Image (cartoon, rainbow, N blue to C red):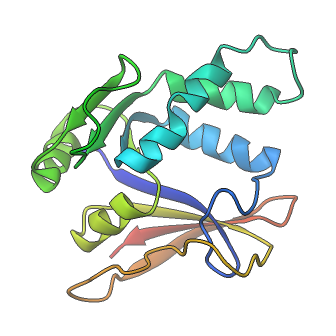
Amino acid sequence: MRKLIFAINTTLDGCVDHTKFFPHEETMDFFMQLVRDTDIFLYGRKTYELMVPYWPDVAKTPPGQDDRDSDIEFAKAFDAVGKIVVVSHSLKSAADAKTTIVNTGIEGEILKLKQEQGKNIMTGGVNLASQLAALGLIDEYYFVVHPIVVGGGTRLFEGISLQENLQLKLVETTVLKSGVMVLRYLKQ
């Protein structure tokens, strides 16, 4: 059975707004390993439109053309993975051929995907992840905590409505050279 994995960068004060801070190269390396263990990305419209066409365009950059070789490697790994955009009524067509749009039955769609053969399913962003957490569909959580306080921006799980507390078990902690801490939790 496949696992649905949620991974996100956050600051010490819980900000997940990607415009407020920039991940270090070693953080990109961590995410690249997660991507290599994934064969489907599950996104809401907003996160999908942030990721595509940005990363597929970066993937077209020849190595050595700029100082972002780790970004190019990540982009190529990202571009190779299929994408599903769920619960989008405003997105009428996909920006690439590897994307499917699903407008109904988010819970049923994910349960079906989990039963299929393949690698992990990965999700990110805020809105869809909040819905998936509320439905109890996320199996693993990776919180990549950057040692900064930004004092503003979007917060993780803001406005989430849970029927009961989401109980997580810390199963792994990794501290990167930059001081970034990767916390891996399993749903209990």
Quadrant of the image occupied by residue 68: top right
Q: Seen from this angle, which residue lies furthest top?
A: 62
User: What residue sits 50% from the left and 32% below the top?
Assistant: 52
Q: Is residue 170 above or below residue 79?
A: below
Give residue 115's position: percent from left, percent from top.
17, 42
Give residue 142's position: percent from left, percent from top.
53, 62
User: What residue sits 15% from the left and 56% below the top?
Assistant: 107
Q: Is residue 139 visible?
A: no
Quadrant of the image occupied by residue 89: top left
Q: Is residue 178 visible?
A: yes
Q: Seen from this angle, which residue lies furthest front?
A: 90
Q: Seen from this angle, which residue lies furthest bottom?
A: 164
Give residue 34's position: percent from left, percent from top.
55, 43
The mark total stands at 0
- Tell me the quadrant of the picture where the N terminus can be found: top left
User: What residue sits 32% from the left and 61% below the top?
Assistant: 138
Q: Is residue 128 left or right of residue 30?
A: left
Q: Is residue 127 above or below residue 33?
A: below
Q: Is residue 188 left or right of residue 32?
A: left
Q: Is residue 107 above or below residue 154?
A: above
Quadrant of the image occupied by residue 149: bottom right
User: What residue sits 68% from the left and 57% below the top?
Assistant: 19
- Tell me the quadrant of the picture where the C terminus can be found: bottom left
Q: Is residue 146 left or right of residue 135?
A: right
Give residue 136's position: percent from left, percent from top.
24, 69
